[in-house]
Image (cartoon, rainbow, N blue to C red):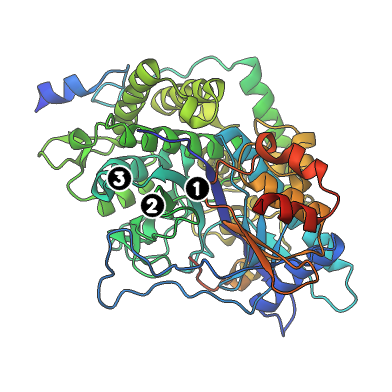
Amino acid sequence: MAIPKVCGIETEYGIHAAGPDANPVTASSVLVNAYASEVDRRTGWDFEDETPEKDARGYAREGAMPPMVETHLANTVLTNGARYYVDHAHPEYSTPECIDPLELVCHDKAGEEIIRRSMVAASNLPTSPVVIAYKNNSDGKGNSYGCHENYLMDRSVPFANVVAGVIPHFVTRQIFAGAGKVGTETTSFGGEQVRYQISQRAEFFEEMVGLETTLKRPIVNTRDEPHADPKRFRRLHVIVGDANLAEVATFLKVGTTSIVLAMIEDDMMPAKELTLADPVRAMHYVSADLSLSRALRAADGSTITALEIQWEIFAAARRYAKERGLDVIGDEAVGEMVLDRWEGVLHGLETDPSTLVQQIDWVAKRNLIEAYRDRHGCNWDDHRLAALDLQYHDLRPERSLFARLSMERLVSDEAVAEAVTEPPKRTRAWFRGRCLARWPNAVVTANWDSLVFDLGTDPLRRVPMMDPLKGTAEHTASLLEACENPTELLDRLSS
Amino acid sequence: MAEREQKRRNAPSRTETVVEEEPAPPSPRGEKLKADLDDLLDEIDEVLEDNAEEFVRNYVQKGGQ
């Protein structure tokens, strides 16, 4: 049975530091530490629970390279329940656990705001170099960094069903979730000329299923690290996505995926009919096909386009909503909003993608670049086009091209500003965030599924939070209010 | 196979052959967007990094996840 689709997004930001001694790791640390000292955040991350080498298939292929956990870099937990740290020479922001895709859009935008505030805080440091952050996924030279999504799933669903069900969606959802890119930077197209792609990330995928995230990237990542009770829950770690700036794109990326996963759990995803013969190649083809008409080979020998696959999944989602409702997406109204937007965007892509210029990143960026080309008559290999591409993702308000495109908003500036400090109310992020806000000195470390308190007396006390749906405002607000200090809280929790 | 494909389509979709369609008359909203884009292009050189080639060349990242 489908369970609530608690979700989150972790974004590795591109980073540029000016100066001859510029070092991306140092620059990333400067950003995180500048922000942490400004908001006086001292709680570090607890690595007790990190097991990125565990494979959802129950084994790891020989020679597979699991990601390393780096424990020595800047690492902090914020009062909104998020984690903000340095990973792989990039600043990374992991949103708190959200209950629905709209709330997640808000917290993803709050992450951007935190990065902006970090840049300002860093620029006020006496010796700091100029540090600039970009919300994109590649440097145009073959180096990619990720924007990963995480979704709560029912552990009892066989992983093979998850794999079969998500692949058609992950190959094709880029037609609305792609962030757009000038050119190509891998050998995925075998020398074929590609001027503009729908996705930043698609061409970096080389396998169907696997544990890696930095090499030979797989469409379905098998990292089995639930950060929750492993007997009941799975956390699906999704690595195929682009980092979106457009709110509609993030909303649809997460909303459609949440519904697909719920359908898989309820055995209502039309996976068999949509099985592709070669999903990895198909993913590359879809990214390079701006006409959205390229026929992909299905496993049964027929052909189907990315748009047709999306229409099929959408139709199944409508049926699913009718039969089961969409409460599982966090909120029935938000679920309906996903369906309406999904239909509208597919229709726009089919009839005239340029009507989506205020909703979808790859369309917005392409429109800007085409207009610039028209005006200046430049070739596709003109550096100015690559510069436009990069600057679309620049997070500095005065340099961001995205910020100048009047894109459609789904969340207000006020809601985003609140999400910078306040946690989501309907997941355990609330308990984490509120404890950090109230007793910043007593919470010595935190991670997704526990908090560690130092009450001044040995030993340290760990509070496990193995269910992402507990520790909500509803469950714990009155308890927290009733406690004057953390000792009282721990006493009450253990009694 | 053709029959199969027909069955698959449950939403209005494009015809198989690409037909050059008459451009739709510009909507007020479309006009506004185009005017905004023109304004942006007018001032974009002030926003763009001074030396595009150097800027693009210097943007090198370590691979991540």
Q: Position of residue A296 (x, y in %)?
A: 22, 41
The amino acid beneath tag 3 is Val
Q: Earlier in the sequence, mark 1 or mark 3?
A: 3
What SS does tag 2 mark?
A: loop
Could you give the CA–CA distance between mark 2 and mark 1, rounded to whole angstroms? 39 Å
- What label sits on residue A231 in the rendered view? 2
Residues flagged by tags 1 and 3 on a common chain: yes
The amino acid beneath tag 2 is Lys
**Quadrant (top left/top right/bottom left/bottom right) for the N terminus of chain B:** top left
Q: Residues within 10 Å of mark 2 (few under 14, many from 20)?
A: few
- Vertical relation: A323 (above or below) B54: above
Chain to which mark 2 belongs: A
Residue A414 is drawn in which quadrant? Answer: top right
Q: Residue at x 90, y 76 (%)?
A: A126
Q: Which residue is mark 3?
A: A162
The amino acid beneath tag 1 is Gly
Residue A406 is drawn in which quadrant? Answer: top right
What SS does tag 1 mark?
A: loop
Q: Which residue is mark 1?
A: A180
Chain to which mark 1 belongs: A
Q: Earlier in the sequence, mark 2 or mark 1?
A: 1
Residue B37 vs residue B6, the one in the foreground: B6
